[in-house]
Amino acid sequence: MASAPQAQALPMFYKDLVPLNSKEHRDWKVKGLDNASFMQQQHAIPLTVDEFANAARNYPIVFSIGDNSVPLILMGLNEGVNTFMDEEGRFNQPAYVPAYVRRYPFMLAKLQPDSEELSLCFDPTTEAIGDFKEGDPLFEDEKPSENTKNILEFCEQFEQAGQRTGQFVEELKKLDLLMEGEVSIQQTGVEKPFIYRGFQMVNEEKLRELRGDELRKMNQNGMLPLIYAHLFSLQIMREVFAKQVEAGKVPQVTEAPAI
């Protein structure tokens, strides 16, 4: 039996993680969840560069603070507030669903810290996987079913997209294009504006000052469309703020907590 992944901080959504194997989970099945309550209290969700074009239509795209910065979509502007979900944990409007969400409850993880090999694991606390009578089988004749192969392929594609995303962020850092973000939103009838900080964004002034050869390289490697998708999406922050106002979830402070 494969051992469980080494103890470490679990990624967002995941409460536990165990490797999928044909002995313990031979008769297990996977089924769709009735809702996405696991993400109901999350205001920021990781995003890969492969998804920028689709996600930018619905969400602001920002970058987290810290050394290991990652792109994020904002589903709310304050911690614990998700303006895209209703009280039952369902989307309250048509919107792009990030691959990070669609991957859950599966993911690839290292079973041993000294090994580079990744194994397909899942969160056993979810109601999507178990010894059910109905659902799609995970194994057939103790071999991965076609459905499991598709899940594995999706998780592998997600990991590859994650690597491309890391390279993209590193290039932004090398060019010194990331800066601390700040958005000021004035609410009608409120004297002071709400100031949102605690995230990073591309510095448009430095982008305009780049040399022609640097811009040409960024255009050829596909970075420029990603940058502009991010910059254009920032306008949606005001729409998300308006949804929070409508839902009565705007904090009575003028500076929001960091992402």
Image: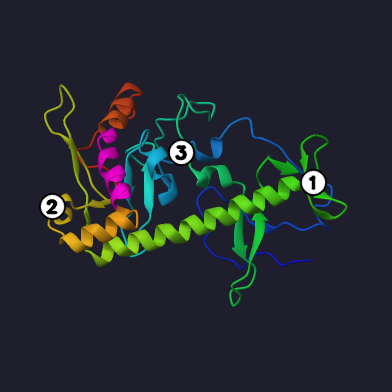
In percent of width and height, residue 123 lies at 64, 51
Residue in view at x 62 percent, y 47 percent: 105
- Graded by Cα atoms within 10 Å as few (under 14), some (14 to 19) or many (20 or more), the crowding at tag 2 reads few
Q: Which of these two is toward me, 50 or 114?
A: 50
Query: Which element carries disc 3, helix, strand or loop?
Result: loop
Separation (CA) of disc 3 from disc 1: 29 Å
Residue at 30% across / 45% down in the picture? 230
Residue 41 disc label: 3
Other residues around mark 3 within 10 Å, as few (<14) / some (14–19) / many (≥20): some
User: Is the N terminus in the top left, top right, bottom left or bottom right quadrant?
Assistant: bottom right
The part of the chain drawn in magenta is 224-237
Tell me if 215 is positioned left or right of 49 in this view: left
The dominant secondary structure in magenta is helix
Cα distance between the residues tagged 2 and 1:
55 Å
Q: Nearer the viewer, mark 3 or mark 1?
A: 1
Q: Which mark is residue 28?
A: 1
Mark positioned earlier in the residue sequence (3 or 2): 3
> Hey, what amino acid is under mark 2?
Glu
What residue is at 33 percent from the left and 26 percent from the top? 243
Q: Tell me, for residue 205, which label it has, or none.
A: 2
Amino acid carrying mark 3 in the image: Gln
Q: Residue lying at the far right in this picture: please name it.
A: 141
- Sequence order check, earlier mark of 3 and 1: 1
**Residue at x 65% of width, y 68% of height:** 111
Lower position in the chain sequence, tag 2 or tag 1: 1
Image coords of residue 120 (percent x, y): 66, 58
